[in-house]
Amino acid sequence: MTDPRLSALFTPCLLVDEGRMMRNIDRLSKRALTLGVALRPHLKTTKSVAAARYVLKDGHGPATVSTLAEADAFAQAGINDILYGVGISPNKLDRVIALHRAGCRLTVLLDCAAQAEAVAAASKASGIAIPAMIEIDGDGHRSGLTAHGPALTQVGRILHDGGAELVGVLCHAGESYGAVGHAAQVLSAEQERQAVVDAATILRDAGLPCPVVSVGSTPTAHAAQNLDGVTELRAGVYVFFDLVMAGLEVCTVDDIALSVLTTVIGHQDAKGWTICDAGWMAMSRDRGTANQRVDQGYGLVCDASGAPIRGLYVKQANQEHGVIARHPDFNGDMPDLPVGTLLRILPNHACATAAQHQRYHVVPKDPDAALMVWDRFGGW
Amino acid sequence: MTDPRLSALFTPCLLVDEGRMMRNIDRLSKRALTLGVALRPHLKTTKSVAAARYVLKDGHGPATVSTLAEADAFAQAGINDILYGVGISPNKLDRVIALHRAGCRLTVLLDCAAQAEAVAAASKASGIAIPAMIEIDGDGHRSGLTAHGPALTQVGRILHDGGAELVGVLCHAGESYGAVGHAAQVLSAEQERQAVVDAATILRDAGLPCPVVSVGSTPTAHAAQNLDGVTELRAGVYVFFDLVMAGLEVCTVDDIALSVLTTVIGHQDAKGWTICDAGWMAMSRDRGTANQRVDQGYGLVCDASGAPIRGLYVKQANQEHGVIARHPDFNGDMPDLPVGTLLRILPNHACATAAQHQRYHVVPKDPDAALMVWDRFGGW
C-alpha cells in the first residue's frame, strides 16, 4: 500500500529523504571536526535556502556557491560569508560589489593575471578590497595555476599590491570523480592537499599573505587522512549523494537521499519495457555512471517506499518518457508494475537531477508527519 | 566590436535569433500547406507563450504539449486545442478535467486498455467526454500499439463505448532521429504514415470513429513526400533547430536559432583549452551528437555575432565550466580569446538546452531594435 502522502503528489517530482540527508550532513561535519578544518559546504547541489539551514551550523556560512544567483539568494537569507567557486570574469564584478554593499563577504576565485588586474581595478574603483583566492591546479582536471610556476606569485602580487584582498589558495580535485575506492581517493586527497600547501608556502615565502588554504571535493573530503596546512574543506553533493558517488564507493545506495517520484504510464511487453513519466526532463541527461563499473542508465528503480527493485534500471530516456528495463547484469523476472504504479528513481548525479526541478518534496524522518516543500532556484 | 546589446547581458544566458526562427517556422508552415494537412506544433521545445505566438497561426491552436504544466500555461494564454502527447496515467485525469472546465479542449494519448478504462471512467464521472487518441507504434521506438494487433480495436471500443471521445490515431517516428539524410527520412516518414493510416482503416472497418490521423517528428515532417490519409502533422524542435538536426541534414548550422551566450573566464594554455562560463548547467548534459558522424561535444563555438569559429567546440563541461578546445577534425590555430570575450555556443539539442534557462533574450531581425525578453517555464 503506497504512502498516501506520496500518492497525493503530481509526478514526476523530486523527493528528499530527510533522515538520510541529516545522516550524510552529520557524517562530513564530524570528519571536518576530526580533521581540524572548517567546513565550507557547496550549496550548488541543493540551491535551496531551506536545505542550507540543515547544512550550515549557525546559518550564516561559510558557504560555497557556483553562480551569483546562488550568492544573491543565500545572501538575502542571511548567509554572509560566501565563496563564488568559479573563475571570475570582469563583467561579473558589478554584482560582486553589490553583494558586498548588501553586507555579504563574497570571495572570488581566479587563476590568471588578467582576472587579478580586473579585480584589483574594481577594488580600487569601488573602495571595497574584494577578497580573492587563487585557484591551484592539483591534477590537471580543469582550471588553476600550478603551484610551482611563475604566475602564482605574480597573480598574488597584482591582487595584494593592487588593492584587492589576497585571501589564499584553493584546489578542487576534480579527477577524484574518477578515483574508484577508498585507497585511490586517499591518494587524490593527499595530492590535493600537497598542491595547495605548496602554493601557500610559495606565496608566504614571497612575503604575500595566505591565511586560507582550501581543499575539497566530495570524494576527497571523505577520504583525506590528514589535512595538515589546510584550513578549510569544501564539498557539495555529499548532502544528497547519488549513483556516481555510490559507484566510487564514497557512499552506498542506501545513503542516497534524492530521488524522482514517477508513475508507470505504459508497457512494451515484447521488449520487457515499462514506460514511466520520468524522462530526461525529470532525471537530467547526466549519464555519470556510463563509464563506471556498473552503468546505471538514467537511474536505479525503487518502489515507492525507496527500496531498490532488484535488477531494474531506467535503460533509456526521452523528454518525458523513461524506459524501465531489466539491467543486463540481472537474469531474474520483471515484477508486475501496472499503469499508475508509483516508483522512485535514484539519480546518477544529484546536482543535475535536482536542477531539473523547482522544488523538493521532503519525506520527514517522522513517518506520521506531513511532507515538507522546499523551494529551489536556478539561473545565473 | 561586440554588439553592445549583448555586452549588457549577464552570462551564461539563452539567445534566440528572431530572423532564423521566423524562417524555420515559415518553412514548415509552407510544407504543411503543400502536403494538405493541418500543423499542430509541439510547444515543448520553446515552453514560452511569446514564442507560441509566432508558431500558432491564429493564436488558439492546435498545439501539442509534453506536460500538463505546459497545457495549463498555454490554456491560460488562450490556446484552446491542445494535445498532451505523453501516455496518460489515471492520477493525471483530475487536471485534464479541470482544463476542460476552464475551456481548453485537451486531448489525451494512450496505448492500453487500463488507460482507456480510466479515461472512460473519468469521462462518465465528470460528464465530460475526454478526447483521446490511440498511439500507434510505427518503428519500435518507444510507445504505442501495433496497428495490426488485437488491442487496437479493443482500446478503441473501451473509449468509444465507455463515454470518452475516440478522436483518432497518432504516430511519432522516434527512430527518425537516427535516420541520416533526406532519403532515409523519406522512408521513415512513409513508414510513419503507413502505420497510422493502417490503424485508422482498421478502426473504421470495426465501426469506430477515427476523424484525426496524426503523424510527426521534425525529421519526418520535413521529408514526407505525401501524407495521403493523414490529417495533421506535428513537430517541435524545428522552431529553433540544433546540432542534432544539422547532423541529420534536416537543417544547416546556419538555421540554428538558439544559442548560449558565454564569457571566457580562463585558459589552460598547455592543453589548448579556453574555459568559459557555459558549463552543463547552461548547455544541458545532452550529448545528442555523440553518436553522429561529427561529435560536437557540448556545442559548437561561434563569435558573439553568431558566426562559427572554425574548428572550435566545447570539448567537455562541468557544472559551470565549459572547456573550449580544437575539434579533433581541425588542424588550424586557436584564435586569441582573452578573458572577458563573449561567445555563442550552438547546442546539441534545443529542447534540453532551453530547459536549463528561465528566459530567452531575443535578438530581433531589426539590427537597431532592442533585445526582447521572453519568459519560459518548466515543471510539471
Image (cartoon, coloured by chain):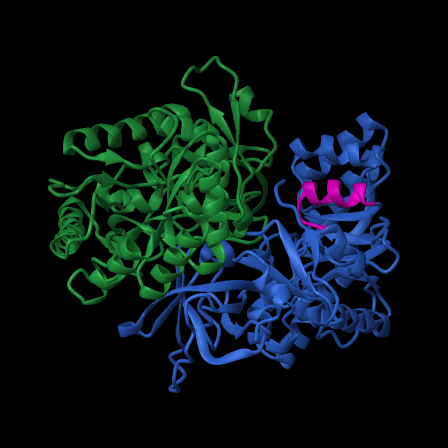
Chain colours: A green, B blue
The outermost residue toward the bottom is B332
Residue A266, image quadrant: top right
Q: Position of residue A301 (x, y in %)?
A: 43, 39
B357 or B3, nearer to the observer? B3
Residue A111, image quadrant: bottom left
What residue is shown at x 46% (from left), y 53% (from top)?
A93
Q: Position of residue A155 (x, y in %)?
A: 27, 61
- Left or right: where B123 falls relative to A187: right
Q: Is A375 drawn above or below residue B216 in the view shown?
A: above
For the question of whether residue A366 can be seen, the reply is yes
- Left or right: where A183 falls relative to B146: left
Q: Is A360 drawn above or below residue B136 in the view shown?
A: above
Q: Position of residue B121 (x, y in %)?
A: 76, 30
What residue is shown at x 69% (from left), y 60% (from top)?
B236
- Left or right: where A281 falls relative to A125: right
Any magenta on residue A299?
no
For the question of whether residue A354 can be seen, the reply is no
What residue is shown at x 50% (from left), y 65% (from top)?
B288
What residue is shown at x 84% (from left), y 36% (from top)?
B129
| Magenta segment | B65-77
